[in-house]
Image (cartoon, helix red, strand yellow):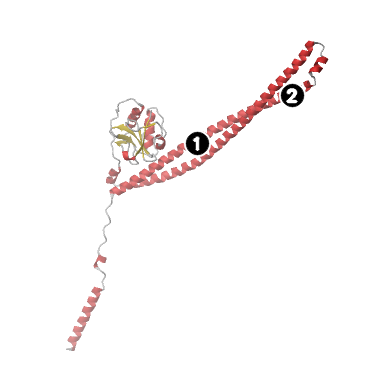
Amino acid sequence: MLFHRQSRVLRSVAAGVAVAAVLSMPPAFAMADPAPPPAPDPAGTVAQVRALSRQAEVITEQWKLAADRLLARRADADRAHGDAAAATATADETRAAQSAFRAQVDRLTSATFEGVRISSLTAMLISDSPQQFMDQMSALDVLAVTNRAAMDKLAAAVSRTEQAKLAATDVETRAAVAELDAARIAGDVAQARLEMGRQINLVQERLGKLTANERTQYASEGFTDYPIDVAGDTVGVRAVRAALTRQGAPYIWGAEGPNTFDCSGLMMWAYRQAGVNLPRVSFDQVRVGIPVVSGLLPGDLIGLYSPASHIGMYVGNGLYINAPQSGDVVKVARVPWRDVTAIRRIG
């Protein structure tokens, strides 16, 4: 009997321990499998790469702009140095002329001083004849006139010398300022080139990671088989026809043709084929020619964004040809009117 009671007690204790163990276990969801990662967003990835490519395009245009400004300022410095050399030579010539006139004035002044000793009365008294008196008086008059003329020439030479010296100083100052500006811009060019390289490398890295489907989405809209035979013979039409021959050419930052292009490089190359030299930066390209408000014609330049960092060329029917972005090719597409900030006509 005692044994049975002990057995029941042990079974009750064991049951209680088991219940306590169950109650002390953590909740069941803590043991569940982790949630699956979010599905990839191809559209978001493509948008990011497009944004990076757009930034690279802006930086590239800034680099080209700085490089052009550097070339222009260095040319200014060279011209200023040439002008300074010419101005210095002129100053030296005027100083030499001044010295020559001064020596002449000194001689005439000395002669005049000697001549003063012969007054009109003295000349009359020492003259043996009326003719000798007239000759002596005439000589005094000639001496006085010649001296005045020499003095006038000396004064003019002194004035020219001073002006030449001031001009030389001004030009030398201009040359020095141009040299300082060129040095500063050279630093800007180096910095822009470094930043451009970093941005391009980043875009290339991201492009390399895109899937085939993402690359398809990344490619800009448009087509590469637009007819080349645009009617007309204006400068703009000739430029359009040249640009259309480059359909399908790869986009490369800073490229100016004939086989690879960026946006402004394509415009510059196409217009060069039509006999017109455009600046090579989109920011400058949208400042040449005349503004167009309505009635677009083939060849009109279409600048996008503010300041203009992308540019294309109108072909007609609401379409334009452009070099869109890295990893893409030259193509014809619909004009993105909401981004247009400038339209210019050349010729």
For the point 74% across and 24% down, the residue is 109
Q: Position of residue 72 (x, y in %)?
A: 48, 35
Displayed quadrant of residue 318: top left
Pointer 1 or 2: first along the chain: 1
Q: Mark 2 points at which residue?
A: 109
34 shown above or below 161: below
Q: Where is residue 165 in the image (x, y as percent from the top left)?
A: 62, 32
Residue 151 makes an appearance in the image: yes
Q: Distance between the residues labelled 1 and 2?
A: 52 Å
Is disc 1 surrounded by few (<14), some (14 to 19) or many (20+) residues within 10 Å?
many
Displayed quadrant of residue 323: top left
Q: Residue 73 carries which label?
A: 1
**Between residues 124 and 128, which one lies in front from this camera angle?**
124
Asked if disc 1 and disc 2 are in contact, CB closer than 8 Å, the reply is no
Helix, strand or loop at mark 2: helix
The extreme front residue here reads 121
Location of the N terminus (image quadrant): bottom left
Helix, strand or loop at mark 1: helix
Three-letter amino acid code at the position of disc 1 = Arg
For the point 49% across and 40% down, the residue is 185
For the point 22% across and 81% down, the residue is 13
Residue 92 makes an appearance in the image: no
211 shown above or below 31: above
Three-letter amino acid code at the position of disc 2 = Thr
